[in-house]
Image: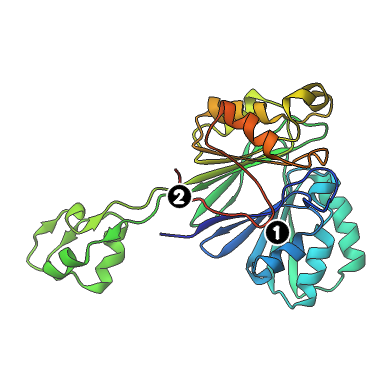
Amino acid sequence: MTRFDLNILGCGSATSTLRHLPSCQVLNVRDHLLMIDCGEGAQLEMRRRGLKFSRLNHIFLSHLHGDHCFGLPGLLSTMALLGKTGTVTIHTFADGKEQFGRLLDYFCRETPFSIEWDVITTRKAVIYEDNAVTVTTFPLRHRIPAVGFRVDEKPKLRHIDPDAVARWQVPRHALNSLRQGRDFVTADGRTVPNDELTTAPDAARSYAYASDTMFSRRVIRAVEGVDWLYHEATYADDCSRKARARYHSTALEAATVAREAGVKQLIIGHFSNRYADDSVLLREAQSVFPATRLAAEGLQIDLNKVD
């Protein structure tokens, strides 16, 4: 089974506390790291979780509030000091390129890696693609321009049946063709159907990230059918007026998005520092969508496993 892990490095809102760090998470896709948001403490949490800086080449910023991006200069500076090579692409709005570009020109003039900027907008768009996944932006409803990210795995290769391959004396050079779903033709011209030589591939999984946002029908449409959804749940329902005033969501609203979008699993995060115990948010969300869990620093989830 190919690797598709989520690592939560920070799931608090607005300010760092003794309980939570600002927003940051890292997807490990076949040992390539994709960072989503980069709050303060990101580089320390990467060290604590054993995530290798050398494998981080893409950083996606959902919006330009400080709790989602103030960790970026320090992270890039440390990566330079450690001798990181290659390219780091930062996916952000035009203002992010301008402001962070100036900062990095001053503090990180010479880096052993190149920094590239991918300027995004609030329009839905595929902003990254490789042989494993596509990353698509979708608009959020917040006080400033903000996007969510949907990560969809591409269809996976079929599994070789070793007994059947041995029985039909399939040469090694033909195995990759079988994994891609092609039939096998023997030396004497007989066609062996692919499903006699292989078994079904692992399911391609999907993950979506929606923070920060008010309850939004656009978000429901954008994340429809994903296996895993991370949705902000800054407040409990008794603070719903405050949530609307600040363009945030309650735990009940996050759960409603998950239910109406038909997702399989919900992770809630971006918790207000008013809560000494996040379980109140979990109980409210589970009353609407039982398949909900709390985010937490250090939490690692195998996204291939959907209950």
Occupied quadrant, residue 294:
top right
| Numbered badge on residue 89 | 1
The quadrant of the picture occupied by the N terminus is bottom left
Q: Earlier in the sequence, mark 2 or mark 1?
A: 1
- Residue 234 position, x and y percent, is 75, 35
- Which sits in the foreground, 25 or 106? 25
Relative to residue 246, is residue 159 drawn left or right? left
Numbered marks: total:
2
Residue at x 86% of width, y 69% of height: 108
- Which amino acid type corresponds to the residue marked 1 in the rendered image? Thr
Q: How crowded is the residue under tag 2: few (<14 C-alpha within 10 Å), some, or many (20+)? A: few
Tag 1 secondary structure: strand
Occupied quadrant, residue 170:
bottom left
Tag 2 secondary structure: loop
Instruction: Write down the residue under mark 2.
Output: 305
Visible in this render: residue 80? yes
| Numbered badge on residue 161 | none
Residue at x 16% of width, y 70% of height: 166
Occupied quadrant, residue 112:
bottom right
Depicted 90 relative to depicted 84: above or below: above
Q: Can you tell which of label 2 and label 1 is closer to the viewer?
A: 2
- Which sits in the foreground, 304 or 111? 304
- Residue 153 position, x and y percent, is 48, 49
Q: How is the image coloured?
A: rainbow
Spatial separation of the CA atoms under disc 2 and disc 1: 29 Å
- Residue 20 position, x and y percent, is 77, 50
